[in-house]
Structure formats: structure tokens, C-alpha cells
Image: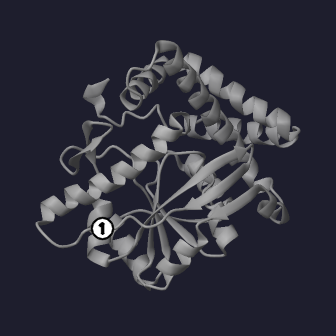
Amino acid sequence: MPVDLFLFLVIKLFQQFVRILPETCAARVGAFLGRVAQRLLTRRRKIALANVRKIVKDISDEQAKSIVRSCFEKLGTNFVELLLVPYLPKEDLPKRFHVEGVPHVEEATRLNKGILALVFHYGNWEIMGIASFMMKQEVIALARPLKGQKFLQGFINQLRTATGLTVIPNQDTARDAMKYLRENRIVAILGDQREKRSKGVYVELFGEKVPTSKGIVMLAMRTGSPVMPVYLRREGFLRYTIVFCEPIEMERKGNIEELIYKNARKINAFLETLIAAHPDEWFLVHRRWGRDAY
């Protein structure tokens, strides 16, 4: 049996198991999974600890370990929540999810240039498609397919679609995004992934320069589309506030390389503020500062 199919079947079976549990038990199972992952994934635990020390200066070892433990527990909770979203009755969603910042979306929509929804690996980003149901407005995510993971890819896309997200296989990010933005639609793009050195621009994040994507700022500068940060604020198990923030103003006049740097720095500065408030909500296990930094 292919590994891909085996993993798919195991996850599907686990999904049916947590589905029949009371919600409080499902929440405990998620946190437990996170603690197990923390013990088993020693390399990722070390990366998370290193990231915490980059984010919070002069933090004690005990405080850093506490943040990492909380992060792993929340990642486990995120996984269980994602599995349960397809089974949430639509009439229950307004009781569980609230939207903040609707006027920002309405104002941006009137520009008729689409919206670049700047999302991050923060909170439970995988269920952010709930925003489309709450706003009654389609949200499109351009996703790169998993190589050689046919069954898992299909299952993950089903889960994402169940949240209300429209998932489009990403072949050419700029071309595809521009097409949807011209149609005045909302296009969600991750803004905190590590970029390849050859493609990125080095911009400060918590005082250290990290390879940062040029794509988002170049797309925004070219289209004039507002760049609107969006994130989920955790309020409880499967309970969130979807926060639409005021768009980040992109500068468009001047030297192109300087503009890319300045605008990318604005995005990283917003991310810093978000992470500093709740570091355990961020995807700390990611080598954001580059492979050589760990």
C-alpha cells in the first residue's frame, strides 16, 4: 500500500473518531496530540525554541519552553479543528465565528481592484475560509499541490473547501492572482513563508534580515490592489474572531528596489506586532530565519 494512501486512511479514521467525541474531549485530544508531537519531533522543538529566543529577547529557558509547549498544543488543536469543520452545522457558524473590520473590506471592495488578503501561519490559518461564509464573499487561495501525495492532497483540499475556501492549483502565482484581482475578488496569499535566497529580498524580522518574498509587494504595486492583513483570533475551541485589518499602504513612487524593500519591511513589521503579542499562536516550528540559522 502506498504511504500516501495509508496516511490518508489513518487520518480519515481518526477524523471519524474525534467526530463522535464531545467537544471538550476533542479539544483535549488535540492538545494531547500536540504534546506528543513536541516529544517526538525533537528537531522541530529545537527550531521552535530558537525562534522564541529571536522573538522574545532575554527570555528564560523555562518561559521559552512554556511558549513552545503551548505552540505545539495549539497546532494539535488546529489539526483536530480542521478535521471537524466539515461537520459543523452552517446555522452554528455565526455562534462560533465573528468578524471584525468589515468596513475595511467594504471600503477596499469599492476600489474595484480586488483585495490581496495577507494571511499568516497564525492562529488556525487552515480554517480561515470560514471568512467567505461569514462575509458571503468568495475567498480564493492559490495553493501549490503536494508532490506525489495524491490522496492527501485531495483530502486536504476537501477540508479547506469545507471551510468555504476556493482552492485554485497554483501554476503561475502572479498571472493567476492578477486575473482574480481584475475581477475584484479576494485572493489570499501567505506572507510569512521563507523565500529562496535567489528570489527573495532580505528584510528585517525581529532585528535579523530574513529572505522575504518580493511577489506580494510587486503584485500590489503593479495592480494597485489593497494589501489587507487577515488573521484569526482564538476565542476557544472552534471559536474565533476573524480580523480584517486596515490595509497596509504600499509605496509606489521611487526606485523599484528600494520600494520593494520598504514595502516588504512594512509587511514584516505588521507580522512582528502580531507575533509579539502571542508568540505561541505562530508556526514556530518553521525555519523562518533560513536553514543556516539553526
Q: Which residue is mark 1?
A: 250
Colour scheme employed for the rendering of this structure: one colour
Q: Is residue 225 above or below residue 280?
A: below
Q: Nearer the viewer, residue 141 or 10?
A: 141
x and y, in percent, of residue 124 in the image: 60, 47
Q: Is residue 275 visible?
A: yes
At mark 1, the secondary structure is loop
Amino acid of disc 1 = Met
Relative vertical location of residue 35 with respect to residue 205 in this rendering, above or below: above
Horizontal arrangement in the rendering, residue 182 relative to residue 100 (left or right): left
* Quadrant in which residue 102 is drawn: bottom right
Residue 213 appears in the picture as rendered: no
Most extreme residue toward the front, as rendered?
58
Q: Is residue 186 left or right of residue 204?
A: right
Q: What residue is drawn where x is 33% and y is 62%? A: 216
Residue at the image point whose x is 32% and y is 23% from the top: 294
Judging depth in this view, the residue of 99 and 286 nearest the camera is 99
Judging depth in this view, the residue of 15 and 210 nearest the camera is: 210
Q: Quadrant of the N terminus?
A: top right
Image location (x, y in percent) of residue 214: 26, 57
Give the left or right position of residue 163, taking residue 2 as reference: right
Q: Residues within 10 Å of mark 1 (few under 14, many from 20)?
A: many
- In percent of width and height, residue 253 lies at 17, 73
Coordinates of residue 101 in the picture (x, y in percent): 58, 67
* Quadrant hosting residue 139: bottom right
Look at 55% across and 79% down and name the residue there: 106
Q: Residue at x 27, y 60 (%)?
A: 263
Horizontal placement of 95 versus 265: left or right?
right
Choose top left, top right, bottom left or bottom right for residue 24.
top right
For this orientation, the residue located farthest to the top is: 61
Query: Which residue occupies the extreme left position in the image?
Result: 255
